Image (cartoon, helix red, strand yellow):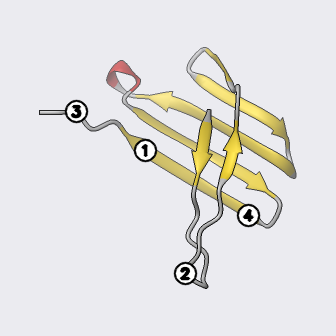
């Protein structure tokens, strides 16, 4: 499942979720462009980084992430 919690200008947050995303050749995608859509890809050694775009209702954005190893 992918989940994005954007901070809104009024101080509240929204929850955007995409359950049951399939993974194929290091990329993931669910939904149709303009209608609750997410698309992304894993990169780097051991797929430790991810990036992507999303569009859901009034929210459009991009994201990036890097796995943090536990000491």
Classify residue 2 by image quadrant.
Answer: top right
Q: Residues within 10 Å of mark 4 (few under 14, many from 20)?
A: few
Classify residue 43 by image quadrant.
Answer: top left
Gap in angstroms between the C-alphas marked 2 and 1 = 23 Å
| Whether label 4 touches label 1, CB < 8 Å | no
Front disc: 3 or 1: 3
- Indicate the secondary structure of the residue bearing disc 1: strand
Left or right: 15 in relation to 55 = left
Q: Which mark is residue 65?
A: 1
Q: Which mark is residue 46?
A: none
Q: Nearer the viewer, residue 42 or 19?
A: 19
Tell me: residue 53, above or below residue 10.
above
Gap in angstroms between the C-alphas marked 4 and 1 = 19 Å
Which residue carries the number 3 mark?
Answer: 69
Tell me: residue 57, above or below residue 8.
above
**Earlier sequence position, callout 2 versus callout 1:** 2
Q: Residue at x 48, y 47 (%)?
A: 64
**Earlier sequence position, callout 3 versus callout 4:** 4
Quadrant of the image containing the C terminus: top left
Front disc: 2 or 1: 2
Tell me: residue 68, above or below residue 42.
below
């Amino acid at each position: 499942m992918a989940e994005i919690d954007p901070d809104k200008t009024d101080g509240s947050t929204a929850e955007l979720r995409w359950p049951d995303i399939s993974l194929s050749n290091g990329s993931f995608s669910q939904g149709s462009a303009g209608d609750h859509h997410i698309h992304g890809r894993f990169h780097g050694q051991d797929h430790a980084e991810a990036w992507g775009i999303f569009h859901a209702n009034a929210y459009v954005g991009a994201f990036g992430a890097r796995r943090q190893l536990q000491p």
